[in-house]
Image (cartoon, rainbow, N blue to C red):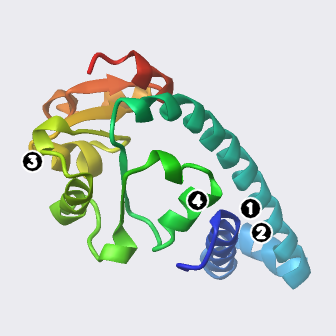
C-alpha cells in the first residue's frame, strides 16, 4: 500500500470492506451484494470512494487554511496509525510543506498508543517533549501517551464525546471542538 495515493488507498479499503460484508455481513446485505454482481459491487465501491475522497479533500483544504499560518510559529508533525504511505498522501493533499515530522506507524513498525511512535516524531522535530503539544482525537491513543512523555495535550472532540469520557481532564490539558480553535489557543 506504500505506493497508494489517497484515492487508491480508500478504494482498496472500501473494496475489502465490501468483500467482507458480502461474505460475513447481515443476510439482507449479503444478498444485495451478491445479486449486484461484480460490476454492481464495483459501482458501490466507486461511489463510496468518490464520496469519501470528495468530503475528505474539502476537509483537508480547510485544514490547510487553518494550519498554514501556524507554520510560521510552530514546527508541526503528524503521528498516525497509517498504512506506510502517509508521506505520499500528504504530498497529494498539499500538506507536506507544513509538516516537519511524519511518524507513520506502518513505516516504523510501532503503533499508537505505544510511546515509540511518539518518540520517533520527537526525534524528528528535535524539540524537548515539554515544549510539544499533541493534538489528537483520542484520549487513549493521543493524549495519554503524550502526557506519559511529558508533552501537553489538546483533545479534539465534540461535546458529546467529552461528556461521555471519564476522567478526560487527566489526559487532556485542553479540549477543542474544531480545528478552527487552534489559532485561538493561547500557547
Give the numbered dot on residue 30: none
Report crowding for label 3: few under 14, some 14 to 19, many 20 or more residues within 10 A (C-alpha): few
Q: Nearer the viewer, mark 1 or mark 3?
A: 3
| Mark pair 4, 1: CA separation | 19 Å
Circle number at residue 45: 2
Tag of residue 49? 1
- Horizontal side of 143 relative to 88 (left or right) equals left
Q: Indicate which disc, 1 or 3, sits on the residue closer to the N terminus.
A: 1
Residue sitting nearer the eye, 158 or 61: 61
Quarter holding the N terminus is bottom right
Secondary structure of the residue carrying numbered label 1: helix
Whether label 4 touches label 3, CB < 8 Å: no
Q: Is residue 95 above or below residue 121?
A: above
The residues tagged by marks 3 and 2 sit, at their Cα atoms, a distance apart of: 41 Å
> What residue is rendered at 20% in x and 63% in y?
114
- Quick one: 5 or 163, which is closer to the camera? 5
Question: Circle 4 is placed at which residue position?
Answer: 91
Q: Residues within 10 Å of mark 2 (few under 14, many from 20)?
A: many
Amino acid at each position: 500500500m506504500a505506493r497508494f495515493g489517497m484515492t487508491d488507498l480508500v478504494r482498496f479499503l472500501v473494496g475489502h470492506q465490501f468483500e467482507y460484508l458480502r461474505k460475513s455481513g447481515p443476510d439482507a446485505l449479503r444478498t444485495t451484494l451478491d445479486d449486484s454482481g461484480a460490476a454492481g459491487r464495483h459501482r458501490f465501491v466507486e461511489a463510496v470512494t468518490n464520496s469519501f475522497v470528495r468530503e475528505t479533500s474539502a476537509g483537508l483544504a480547510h485544514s490547510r487554511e487553518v494550519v498554514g499560518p501556524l507554520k510560521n510559529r510552530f514546527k508541526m508533525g503528524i503521528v498516525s496509525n497509517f498504512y506506510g504511505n502517509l508521506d505520499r498522501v500528504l504530498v497529494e493533499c498539499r500538506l507536506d510543506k507544513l509538516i516537519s515530522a511524519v511518524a507513520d506507524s506502518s513505516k516504523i513498525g510501532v503503533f499508537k498508543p505505544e510511546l515509540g511512535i511518539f518518540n520517533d516524531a520527537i526525534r524528528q522535530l528535535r524539540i524537548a517533549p515539554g515544549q510539544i503539544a499533541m493534538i489528537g482525537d483520542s484520549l487513549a491513543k493521543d493524549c495519554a501517551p503524550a502526557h506519559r512523555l511529558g508533552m501537553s495535550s489538546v483533545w479534539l472532540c465534540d461535546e458529546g464525546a467529552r461528556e461521555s469520557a471519564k476522567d478526560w481532564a487527566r489526559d487532556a490539558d485542553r479540549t477543542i471542538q474544531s480545528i478552527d480553535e487552534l489559532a485561538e489557543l493561547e500557547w
